[in-house]
Amino acid sequence: MAKKTIDWMKKALDGKIQQFDQFTLKLGSYKTLFGLTDAQVTEARNDYLWANYSVICAAQFEQELKNRFEWRDGLLDGPVTAVAAQVPSIGTEFNPPQPPAVPDGILPRWRALVEQLKGHKQYTKAIGADLGIEAPAAPAQRTKPLIRLNTQPGGAVKLNVVKDGHDAVAIYTRRNGETQMTLLGVFTRSRITDARENVIAGQPELRQYEAQYQDGDVAVGERSDRCSASTQP
């Protein structure tokens, strides 16, 4: 069965920065174990300092821009007030980190360094947890698909199936006049379109669908609950 994986690097930007801070603060204690140089440890920390600086600056200027638009809109459109609103300050100055500016590509450099550490014979999950670079355990993988349907003009039906890390999903269907579910196809994508036209043009019909996961050539788990939709003419 295909397995879900979770990236060790956090998705949220603030989470990445905090994770990078922990990593670079502790990296020096492992430099001998992994054969890292003082320069590599320093470069990683400098990358963090400039990454953090860039995030703080952008967030502050984003808020200042929002404040200026709100001030402009109130000044021009009201509501009418008896006294003037406080005029926003003209920019905020930030002191950059002491190390010289670093090249672009901080996160790819960090990822490459982590891959280097994880490929070292001395690496363990306990060390990775201490450095903050071990991914959390993936939640249990679905064995029963979930389907959502959306009808389109002319009889087409769009299906959205939660694949949850599986290789493919087999779709079974039945419509007016049919006595059993038949295979529509096996799809590696999660968004599927049943593009068949209505049997009788201009007349809606009932379509029913079931889905089952497939990994390789093997069916996995149980079929989904049967979903129904009345097609559009």
Image: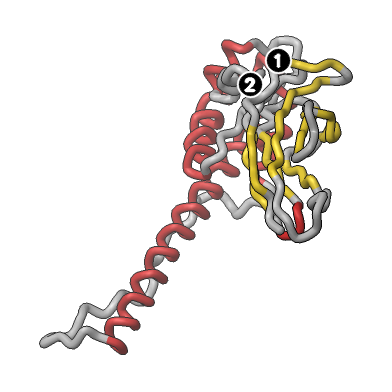
Q: In the image, is 220 to the left or to the right of 15?
A: right
94 w.r.t. 151: above or below: below
- Residue closer to the observer: 154 or 201: 201
Marks 1 and 2 close (CB-CB < 8 Å): yes
Q: CA distance from mark 1 to mark 2?
A: 8 Å
- Give the x, y percent position of residue 60: 40, 61
Q: Residue at x 75, y 60 (%)?
A: 202
Q: Quadrant of the N terminus?
A: top right
User: Which label belongs to residue 118?
Assistant: none
Splitting the image into 4 quarters, where does residue 117 fall? top right
- Give the x, y percent position of residue 160: 67, 41
Splitting the image into 4 quarters, where does residue 140 fall? top right
Pointer 1 local density, CA inside 10 Å: few below 14, some 14–19, many at least 20 = few
Disc 2 on helix, strand or loop? loop
- Give the x, y percent position of residue 74: 28, 82
Q: Residue at x 76, y 58 (%)?
A: 154
Among numbered discs 1 and 2, the one appearing first in the sequence: 2
- Give the x, y percent position of residue 162: 66, 33
Q: Which residue is mark 2?
A: 142
Pointer 2 local density, CA inside 10 Å: few below 14, some 14–19, many at least 20 = some
Look at label 1 and name its amino acid: Gly
Q: Which residue is mark 1?
A: 221
Answer yes or no: is residue 39 visible. Answer: no
134 w.r.t. 171: above or below: above
Q: Residue at x 69, y 43 (%)?
A: 206
Look at label 2 and name its amino acid: Arg
Answer yes or no: is residue 105 visible. Answer: yes
